[in-house]
Image (tube, coloured by chain):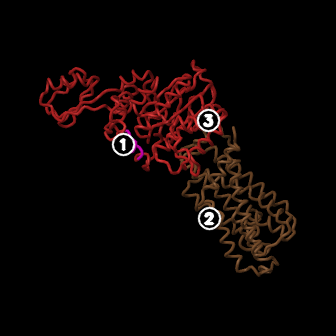
Chain colours: A red, B brown
């Protein structure tokens, strides 16, 4: 594995020109990521963006078709063999016939310097169910055990692929409290998510992926401004699109039948102006644009691919920048994803 | 790194899985009692001069241990299906320690199967000098090595829903061709030729050597070693390739 030539030699993760295809599908198309020790970084993107494929290569679970990846200054497998990586994969259940405590102890026994099992159970709120068999847990409990399995390693680097999926609101809150605690202990954390508000609240930096490429990389505030647009929909027959586009706060205007759809950088200003100019507008809806839609636009501008398409089913609530009402919607979006990935036309990556 | 602890938890899991445990031990036991029970006074099975319960005890030991070894593959397939295999890959557990734990667990099941059938055989009147019990058992355990490796290989190649028929059919075929259910000798013709290159034949012979007092032929070692090496290469390849989402 060639040593990366950029200045991340002492970094936790460095990838350069990383590529991976599954058959005809190019899941990752040249990804450069540099993460320094002690950083908490969100890998943000819609389903199918290449997040999990990238993470698989960082963990050494799959070999890149091209490019290089370095973890803690060496190959992924060297870092894994040294017990320096703890990870929570996107999919996965637990093996049966052990108690929660025994399973965590079993994994702890594989690492050179693990956390005490009791501490791992406390951090993940599992003490009360430590004696329960793993096959009798709820989805949220299973997810917490998987988190305990990742952190009992006490590894320098934690990689978590959509860790909060299947957790309830309370589970998420305590999960992120623990994550802050781990970040304060100096861990390097990389987590994949498709919730913008998770990246915003818990990461120092976000790396946006779409269509197998990094489309943005920077402080979460900047990312939020980039993709934090809202849309206004209203029934307004006969309005001029050019005039609508000229309204303050409006960055895009489109017509769908009798309805108009305005993309807004500042939806407050836009709605005031819209009602001033068109008091007859009715059926007004203001919604956060989905990450997917925002990403599709970003990539359309950056790389000339992926023209915006209507994927209304997936946009519900994904990455609401206001952070409200997204818990339930997130679950719904997850169900959609599972329905799709379970379909015969297997997706290369989710 | 403490691979001993990992092995200990693997053994614990096996014993705790009652259905697996009871069925693995119970099936050969019941089958043995059904076949050998009615023949417990037959001291000259098919003109071989062998006491029938002894012959069937040996046959059932080879069948039961073969199944036991292969069914460790079913457990591996189940672990892969839930993604646990990938979780282990991102831990420092070495390939060697992982495979050792799997082999030891399979051997534990085999030893229990052997013990249960010996006790039943003794109850039906089988009686051998202590040295012969021991000699036979050691040879059987050695002959099981290729089956342990085969179990691991198929566990990493098949899915939980396809491994059931594969093990069921595979064990039945190997047991049949290996002479578990009826004696295979020179007079069996082509079957004899085929049997000689199968590890299951030598598994059965391991005990027959003790009965007949024949020497353990060098070609038995050749056959067993060849199967072990080929299957081990296959198992290693299967394990290495097996890092994807199932």
Q: Residue under circle 3?
A: A116
Q: Chain of mark 3?
A: A
Q: Say whether residue A63 is visible.
A: no
Q: Between residues A308 and B117, which one lies in front from this camera angle?
A: B117
Q: Between residues B138 and A127, which one lies in front from this camera angle?
A: A127
Which disc number belongs to residue A332?
1
Tags 3 and 2 on a common chain:
no
| Residue stretch in magenta | A330-338
Q: Residue under circle 2?
A: B169
Q: Position of residue B162 (x, y in %)?
A: 56, 58
Residue B170 inside the magenta-drawn segment: no
| Residue A125 relative to residue B95: left or right | left
Q: Residue furthest front?
A: A128
Which image quarter holds the C terminus of chain A?
top left
| Residue B146 relative to residue B84: left or right | right
| Residue at 81%, 76% in the rendered image | B50
């Amino acid at each position: 594995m060639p040593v990366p030539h950029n200045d991340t030699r002492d970094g936790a993760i460095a990838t350069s020109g990383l590529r991976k295809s599954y058959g005809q599908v190019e899941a990752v198309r040249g990804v450069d990521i540099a993460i320094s020790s002690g950083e908490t970084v969100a890998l943000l993107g819609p389903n199918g963006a290449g997040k999990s494929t990238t993470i698989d290569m960082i963990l050494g679970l799959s070999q890149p078709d091209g490019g290089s990846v370095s973890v803690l200054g060496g190959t992924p497998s060297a870092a894994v063999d040294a017990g320096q990586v703890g990870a929570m994969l996107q999919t996965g259940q637990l093996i049966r016939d052990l108690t929660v405590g025994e399973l965590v102890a079993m994994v702890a026994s594989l690492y050179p310097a693990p956390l005490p099992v009791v501490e791992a159970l406390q951090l993940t709120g599992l003490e009360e169910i430590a004696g329960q068999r793993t096959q009798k847990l709820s989805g949220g409990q299973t997810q917490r055990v998987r988190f305990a399995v990742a952190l009992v390693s006490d590894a320098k680097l934690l990689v978590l692929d959509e860790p909060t999926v299947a957790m309830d609101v309370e589970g998420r809150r305590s999960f992120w409290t623990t994550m802050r605690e781990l970040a304060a202990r100096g861990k390097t954390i990389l987590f994949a998510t498709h919730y913008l508000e998770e990246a915003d609240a818990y990461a120092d930096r976000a790396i946006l992926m779409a269509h197998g490429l990094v489309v943005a990389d920077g402080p979460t505030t900047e990312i939020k401004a980039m993709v934090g647009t809202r849309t206004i929909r209203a029934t307004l027959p006969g309005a001029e699109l050019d005039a609508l586009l000229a309204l303050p706060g409006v960055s895009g205007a489109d017509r769908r039948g009798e309805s108009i759809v305005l993309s807004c950088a500042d939806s407050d200003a836009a709605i005031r102006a819209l009602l001033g100019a068109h008091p007859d507008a009715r059926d007004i809806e203001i919604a956060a644009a989905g990450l997917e839609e925002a990403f599709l636009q970003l990539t359309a501008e950056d790389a000339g691919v992926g023209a915006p398409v209507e994927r209304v089913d997936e946009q519900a609530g994904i990455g609401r920048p206001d952070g409200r009402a997204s818990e339930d919607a997130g679950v719904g979006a997850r169900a959609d994803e599972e329905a799709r990935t379970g379909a015969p036309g297997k997706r290369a990556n989710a | 790194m403490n691979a001993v602890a990992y092995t200990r938890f693997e053994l614990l899991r096996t014993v705790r899985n009652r259905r697996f445990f009871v069925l693995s031990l119970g099936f050969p036991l019941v089958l043995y009692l059904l076949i050998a029970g009615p023949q417990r006074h037959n001291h000259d099975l098919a003109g071989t001069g062998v006491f029938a319960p002894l012959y069937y005890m040996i046959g059932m030991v080879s069948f039961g241990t073969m199944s036991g070894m292969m069914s460790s593959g079913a457990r591996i397939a189940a672990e892969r299906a839930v993604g646990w295999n990938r979780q282990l890959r991102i831990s420092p557990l070495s390939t060697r320690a992982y495979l050792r734990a799997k082999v030891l667990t399979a051997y534990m099941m085999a030893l229990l199967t052997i013990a249960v059938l010996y006790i039943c055989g003794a109850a039906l009147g089988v009686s051998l000098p202590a040295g012969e019990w021991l000699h036979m058992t050691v040879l059987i355990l050695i002959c099981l090595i290729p089956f342990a490796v085969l179990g691991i290989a198929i566990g990493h190649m098949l899915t939980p829903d396809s491994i059931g028929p594969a093990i069921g059919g595979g064990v039945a075929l190997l047991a049949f061709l290996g002479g578990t259910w009826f004696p295979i000798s020179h007079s069996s013709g082509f079957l004899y030729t085929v049997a000689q290159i199968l590890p299951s034949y030598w598994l059965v012979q391991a005990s027959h050597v003790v009965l007949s007092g024949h020497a353990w032929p060098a070609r038995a070692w050749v056959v067993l070693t060849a199967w072990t090496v080929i299957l081990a290469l296959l198992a290693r390849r299967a394990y290495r390739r097996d890092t994807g989402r199932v």
